[in-house]
Amino acid sequence: MKELFKRILTDFIEKEIKGIVSREYKIPLESKKIISLIGVRRSGKSSILFDLINQLRKEIARENILYLNFEDDRLYPLKIEHLDLVLESYFELYPHKRNEKIYLFLDEVQVVEGWELYVRRVHDNFNISIYITGSSAKLLSTEIATSLRGRTVSYEIFPFSFAEYLSFRDIEINLHSSKSRSFIQNAFESYMVDGGFAETIGEESDMARRILSDYLELIVFKDIAERHNISNTALLKHLNKYCFTNIATLLSFTKLYNEFKSQGYKLSKDTIFNYMAYLEDAYALFTVPIFRNSIKEEQRNPKKIYAVDNGFKKMYDYAISEDKSKLYENIAFLHLRRQTKQIYYFKGDQEVDFYAKLDHEALLVNISYEMKEAKTRKREINGLVEAMEYFSMKKAFLITREEKDEIMIEDKKIIILPMVEWLLTD
């Protein structure tokens, strides 16, 4: 095993890393904390590591930077007792580095059971900066937090935001230029349907669908079925299909249980709860509760479901053109979710899509793809006014396809913005 580690470490030290696109995330290069990058598969966690490594290589000797991908088939099956051999192998190659600071990058670390015990010990006993990635929210769980005892700072990584998508496609962001706006709007139509996974950008529709299908297979079987010992993968895949087809809609667990049971599936209500939790744990799906002043009240109401990427909807749903309002809402959710976990929907006499608590302010946001009909416009505005009165807020946003305006109702301001403009401005 030592010889294998030596070869893998050496190969990476000699390797040139090219074609990496910088992301919006501000990950520190020098930190006393263990840096964790967590997110759905293929969201760009490894690319961010490589970007950090390229930055470090400008300042320090590349021999001081170690990288291991635990999903490398040559390391299978890797157990916790093998991890000690990583630094042993490295110091046999570079004995003079024992007195220097080194940087350790561990990709998809959750593959090794008990990894956090090793990481904690190495962090405490060596002059080392550690960066880890994982495709599971379990890296944020109380068990891990207890094991690492406040030693880690975590960053959630998502597929490309719209701004990153434009950067990846070399499209200039200038909202004052008619020419630039036309390119941006054209790109948005693709982003809305195809999503923001880097490998799908620029691919033909059929190839993009195949790529996304492979991602889902990995999520369902490797991140969920294998990890949680699920044998009823047919039910899991059916739940997947249901959720991605019905993004931005209310989900009643009882209703779903009854529907699946009527279709002949053998399951309990706990099965639905658990499978949904696993999908959220793998960052494939998110659920948003109603805003209430008690957790019990929140739990009694249906939750809204959203996907980590719009592209997953077209995996199962070919009637995309008729459902752009849901795609708009999912993009809006992801825009907010990149900034905060505290997202709710509000329901009084009318429903408001999002009440989000950011670090510096709270936001009320309604999404309406088109407001050609007067009754639609009235409903959206009345809902926001009602919510502003409930939360004692003076400002709210109404996001549409192309309308731009400001409405004052007494002392309350409703800012109407095109989705593209909202995504690309503070």
Image: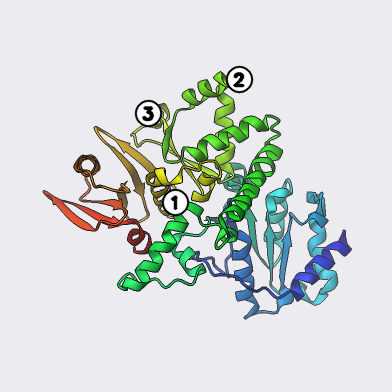
The numbered mark, 2 or 1, whose residue comes first in the sequence reads 2
- Residue type pointed to by label 3: Glu
Residue 244 position in % (x across, y down):
51, 40
Question: Which residue is found at the position 52% from the left and 68% from the top?
Answer: 168
Q: Marks 2/1: CA distance?
A: 34 Å
- Residue type pointed to by label 1: Leu
The residue closer to the viewer here, 53 or 351, is 351
The residue closer to the viewer here, 315 or 48, is 315
Q: Can residue 43 be seen from the camera position used here?
A: yes
Q: Are marks 2 and 1 in contact (CB under 8 Å)?
A: no
Mark drawn on residue 334: 1
Quadrant location, the N terminus: bottom right
Q: Which residue is mark 3?
A: 297
Q: Marks 1/3: CA distance?
A: 25 Å
Question: Which residue is found at the position 72% from the left and 68% from the top?
Answer: 66
Mark drawn on residue 264: 2
Residue 118 position in % (x across, y down):
73, 53
Residue 221 position in % (x across, y down):
68, 41
Q: Determine the secondary structure under disc 2.
A: loop
